[in-house]
Amino acid sequence: MMKRVIWRANQVISIETRRRDENRKENVYVLAQMINRAQLLVFNLFNTDNNWENIDLNKAPILFCTYVTKQFISCSNIYKQKVEPLKEYKPPVYQIHMLGIRARKITLWEGTADEREIMFLGDGGGALIEGDIGNCIYIMPEIPFTDNETIDKYELTNVRIYAEFNERLYLCYKFGKNVDPMKDLVFNRPIPIEYKEYIDIISS
């Protein structure tokens, strides 16, 4: 039986992107580091054997840093790794806060066999803030939908959960870069068919 992983700042872990109820044959792991206040620093380091020997995180590319829930930690298959953590890492001070609280309908892949209609919170778009919600400064009250540089650079304030976040990590592996389907939905971006599993997860 897998040992329970307790949150501890600077603990390096690997995360199994495959969900426990999933039959996907390919098992992909990603390396991450726990940061203070339930933030997870995710590196652009993936493999299929969960072997992380000779890893120097000072030279490792960073994908992103985001908040995760205890539910994500308890429900995911997570393994402690004997890898020296990245020291003195400072999480980004800017984040993107979704605008509005009402639910809206979004139709995806309209007119195809994969057409989906989902309910999604928010009016569409986001604000760039400094700090955390409740104690923040608005840097850009409304990020233009065409400002791809800002949208791609910063994480949402949303706290990520199992199994939504597991699928996002797997999509980062598949696309070979940092992708966030939730942020693409927030900013009304085109949604590739590769996001279909993710869409099914958040709409189930």
Image (spheres, rainbow, N blue to C red):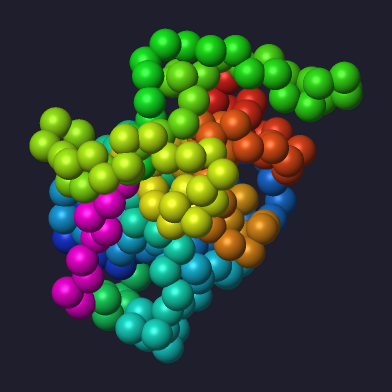
Instruction: Estimate the x, y position of residue 181 in percent, counting from the top left.
Output: 57, 40
> What segment is highlighted magenta in the picture?
87-95
Q: Indicate whether residue 94 is drawn in magenta.
A: yes
Q: Nearer the viewer, residue 137 or 180?
A: 137
**Picture residue at 38% right of the left edge, 35% below the top:** 142
User: Between 180 and 170, which is closer to the camera in this rendering?
Assistant: 180
Give the side of residue 24 with respect to residue 13, left or right.
right
Would residue 8 be visible to someone looking at this image? no
* x and y percentages locating residue 129 in the rendered image: 26, 43
Q: Quadrant of the C terminus?
A: top right
- The correct choice, above or below, for 98 with respect to 35 in the image is above
Q: Is residue 146 above or below residue 198?
A: below
Pick whichever, 142 or 36, lies toward us. Answer: 142
Residue at 50 percent of width and 71 percent of height = 45
Q: How many marks?
A: 0
Q: Is residue 138 visible?
A: yes
71 with respect to 184 (left or right): left
Residue at horizontal 53 percent and vertical 13 percent from the top: 104
Q: Is residue 31 magenta?
A: no
- Please tell me which residue is depicted at 32% across the width and 78% down the height of the picture: 83
